[in-house]
Image (tube, coloured by chain):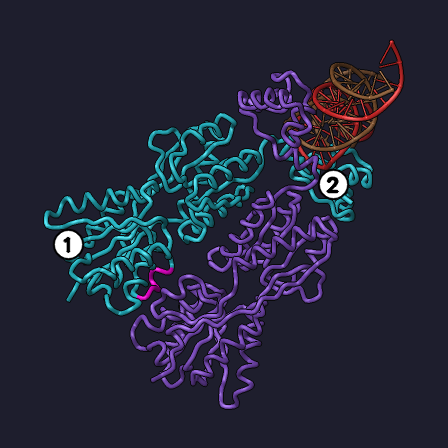
Chain colours: A purple, B cyan, C brown, D red
DNA sequence: GGGAGATAATGAATCGTTTCAAGGATACGT
DNA sequence: ACGTATCCTTGAAACGATTCATTATCTCCC
């Protein structure tokens, strides 16, 4: 049933070595032979066995990508960027979804290690240094995505989340808000912690402003809705006058909860700003202000760094993008 | 650098066969030996080489999944479902994104074939029968996802799109609309054609109703926005009074375009219903009515069918789910 | 004490490809 | 006619795990 180079070689009456050469370096083979072998390949419907190639090569032509949440368009955009650049280099991308769960993340890394992938791109849940060093010892390079490498000796492509957090809250303050709520969590997610820290810095510059923390257990629409409901249930004078959500999914959820029953209006009563600027932000009930990150570019660059590190001198590099404020209706100043 | 079973065997002073047995059937090995081998594995940091295993096994433990659009939450939900059931069976899922492009789809299938995947789940761009039959000849089973198999002899898990299209338009008619526009395309996408055909059937039941086609080139927010703008630019008496968009992404785009400038109001001037009921539908400018499909369940079932077909008698099975109407503000009847 | 039976461990063969040293054929220049 | 350079092709070794027929060791019982 399975057709191998041997069968092709037999039919074309050449050696297996020649078949392999036709496949990999046709210019080393006489034209007549090439076409004879090609004909045999077509006739038998031969398809290369990747496992055997990889075994010989010692490494696969796939890149493993582990993201925190496939349902977040920010990450699928990164994946698209990565995939594009990978394809240009004749590589493919294996997409793994850790769902913020360290054990799922670990099992993907195990899988990738067993597969002897070309390299790994990862937006880690916790501090991955130790695990990634083991990968490196085994000859697998890793590039951090959406997370700086903090001198841990890995290449990384990230966006300055502290600065993004600062921009978001600075914008809220500039438009006259003073009682800010930060909605996000868990803290263990680095991006959340950084955005919060930027937010705090902005608050510190404004003596009459205050920052309240509303923790969530996940960065999803659902968690946002829950947080939003907790705000809506408060007496109106105990509500914040602005919300900075740690990402757009949360912001969408918060928005939904606040506006649904018509008690609270956005942005009149409460302004909202999110993070990531996913496509849907502009299509929300009230178009959402947000902090934009160059997501596809992150994926592209990450693959580039990976390829450079694998094939080149092995030098690491850190890239940090600056985010960008996108203002929409949800943070319109009060009349 | 690379640690193989040989090294482990040497350190534990057993044969390679025994190491393999410890890995795969520890109960066949004396407890003392197991722990000695385990110790050696830990000390050396041995990691199995998947390529070698697969080569021997003749087939990998991955399932290839090709979807039409990773950015569409409907498909990532399917992927999540598939991944979950796969993981329970000690399989992993490779996610490929065809982006409605037949050549991308083909190159993923080539890749999966070279990888000798365990099986393929595919939501195909065109008619994949021929290609999938070649896969089958090579011993790779395929299950169609979000598409009935039409007697082509493959298992499939789909949702009755004709019925969904009918439900959508029937609902619009029931709420008093008569000049319906169907926005969607390209026709070559089977789901679009089926939903349209259901829509036509509903129209046929209502003599005073009319259906207009507004073709799009893709099923994305962007394409929807373009279509929506073309409607907005018309004189108000030439606009339809309801829109049925072939999926929610389109619907969101249409909504954006119509409502943005405030000229057209939804649902007063134009009602909108989408398809898929993605999370964002309920959070749109005007919460969108939609046709809900059990997306995660589709992924789960597809993997189940695949596993059954691969390991069992090879019998195929077709599953067809019925969609469900979800009514929200965007189709509220006019006062 | 010897044979039957159970239990463990062995090691060579195998999967399908790539690589590479070696060999063979051909043409060319002298 | 001979040496040499050029161009193709060959065939065996290697990658690393699994399998399985075989051998080794031990137990138990008559």
At x 55%, y 44%, the residue is B92
* Mark identifier at residue A96: none
Q: Decide: few, some or many residues near mark 2? Use Cα within 10 Å; few <14, some 14-19, many ≥20.
A: many
Look at the image and say whether residue B155 sits in the magenta stretch: no
Res. B21 in view: no
Mark 2 lies on a secondary structure that is helix
Q: Please give left or right for residue B17 compared with residue A117 in the image.
A: right
In depth, the one of D14 and D17 nearer the eye is D14
At x 46%, y 58%, the residue is A73
Q: From what the image shows, is residue A300 above or below residue B144?
A: below
* Mark identifier at residue B178: 1
In depth, the one of B215 and A125 nearer the eye is B215
Q: Are marks 1 and 2 in contact (CB under 8 Å)?
A: no
In depth, the one of A304 and A267 nearer the eye is A304
Alpha carbon distance from label 1 to label 2: 75 Å
Res. B14 in view: yes
Q: Residue lying furthest bottom in this view?
A: A208
Establish whether labels 1 and 2 are both on one chain.
yes
Looking at the magenta stretch, what is its main secondary structure? helix
- The answer for which chain carries disc 2 is B
Spot occupied by residue A142 in the image (x, y as percentages of width and height):
66, 54
Q: Which residues are magenta?
A: B280-285
1 or 2: tag closer to the N-terminus: 2
Spot occupied by residue B86 in the image (x, y as percentages of width and height):
51, 43
Query: Which residue corresponds to mark 2?
Result: B34
Front label number (1 vs 2) = 1
Q: Quadrant of residue B232?
A: bottom left
């Amino acid at each position: 049933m399975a057709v191998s180079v041997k069968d092709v070689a037999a039919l074309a009456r050449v050696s297996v070595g020649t078949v392999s050469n036709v496949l990999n370096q046709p210019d080393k083979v006489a034209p007549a032979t090439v076409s004879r072998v090609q004909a045999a390949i077509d006739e038998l419907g031969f398809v290369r066995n990747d496992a055997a190639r990889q075994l010989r090569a010692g490494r696969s032509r796939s890149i493993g990508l582990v993201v925190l949440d496939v349902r977040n368009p920010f990450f699928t955009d990164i994946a698209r960027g990565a995939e594009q650049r990978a394809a240009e280099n004749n590589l493919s991308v294996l997409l793994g979804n850790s769902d913020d769960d360290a054990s799922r993340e670990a099992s993907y890394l195990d899988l990738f290690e067993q597969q002897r992938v070309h390299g790994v791109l990862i937006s880690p849940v916790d501090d991955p240094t130790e695990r990634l060093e083991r990968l490196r010892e085994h000859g697998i390079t890793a590039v951090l995505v959406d997370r700086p490498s903090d001198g841990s000796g890995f290449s990384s492509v990230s966006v300055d989340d502290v600065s993004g957090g600062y921009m978001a809250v600075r914008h809220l303050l500039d438009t006259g808000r003073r009682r800010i709520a930060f909605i996000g969590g868990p803290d263990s997610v680095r991006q959340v912690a950084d955005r919060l820290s930027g937010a705090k810095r902005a608050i510190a510059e404004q003596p009459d402003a205050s920052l309240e923390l509303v923790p969530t257990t996940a960065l999803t629409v659902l968690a946002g809705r829950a947080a939003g409901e907790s705000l809506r249930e408060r007496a109106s004078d105990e509500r914040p006058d602005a919300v900075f959500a740690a990402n757009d999914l949360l912001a969408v959820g918060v928005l939904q909860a606040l506006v649904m029953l018509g008690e609270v209006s956005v942005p009149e009563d409460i302004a909202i700003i999110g993070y990531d600027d996913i496509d849907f932000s502009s299509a929300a009930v009230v178009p959402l202000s947000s902090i934009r990150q160059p997501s596809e570019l992150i994926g592209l660059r990450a693959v580039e760094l990976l390829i450079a590190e694998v094939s080149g001198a092995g030098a690491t590099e850190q890239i940090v993008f600056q985010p960008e404020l996108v203002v929409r209706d949800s943070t319109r100043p009060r009349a």
